[in-house]
Image: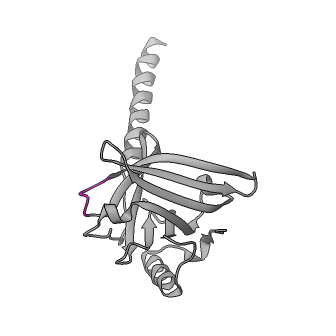
Amino acid sequence: MKKLTKIVIPVSLGILGLMILNSCSVKIPDGAVAVNNFEKEKYLGKWYEIARLDFKWEKNMEQVTAEYSMKENGHIKVDNKGYNYVKKEWKESIGEARFVEDEKTARLKVSFFKPIWAGYNVIDLDENYRYALVAGNNLDYLWILSREKTIPEDIKQRFLSKAKSLGYKTEDLVWTKQD
């Protein structure tokens, strides 16, 4: 029995360690390229979610916004808010974003539950920082963001075309209701 314990505990700790380490690695989908010459100061502020690939944390959410601001430690504060129309309540989640490479490359990692990090990759952005296409670690995560509650049709089509070319199932996008 002692021999089994001597094996099980280290193996279990090793597996747990690998799981945590894996959750800290952030990726960008194959073929996607993060925006270069990124200016974080222009990206800060409030964004409205126009569309997303739905997932557990945003299920039944509308009026979703994300607000980005600088923290004293130089990282970016992420303040996500949305209204759960099923539970009839507002939800808020505050996290932190950090650059994966340098600050001129729009590849970030974001965490709402440290030490777990996820990819936040700005893969398309208009020159005035009014509309953004954001990819997660893989083809399960995609967001279309706007500084306004709507997005022009030409930008929408540009983002949809880019997402499709990368393999995203754009027909599965949830178009966020913004009141």
The image shows residue 81 at horizontal and vertical percentages of 58, 54
Identify the residue at image location x=41%, y=28%.
Answer: 13
The image shows residue 30 at horizontal and vertical percentages of 37, 68
Q: Looking at this view, is 71 or 32 the one in front?
A: 71
Tell me: residue 28, above or below residue 124.
above
Report if residue 33 lies within the magenta region. no
Give the position of the C terminus as an image quadrant.
Answer: bottom right
Residue 127 visible in rendering: yes
The image shows residue 116 at horizontal and vertical percentages of 44, 43
Count of all numbered marks drawn on residues in the image: 0
Q: Looking at this view, is 176 or 16 the one in front?
A: 176
Query: Residue lying farthest bottom?
Result: 154
- Determine which quarter of the picture holds residue 165: bottom left
The image shows residue 71 at horizontal and vertical percentages of 36, 46
Tell me: residue 107, above or below residue 132.
above
Q: Is residue 42 left or right of residue 162?
A: left
- Determine which quarter of the picture holds residue 27: bottom left
Identify the residue at image location x=46%, y=76%.
Answer: 163
Query: Residue lying farthest top?
Result: 2
Identify the residue at image location x=26%, y=58%.
Answer: 103
Q: Is residue 105 left or right of residue 141?
A: left
Residue 29 visible in rendering: no
Where does the magenta region start and end?
Answer: 99-104
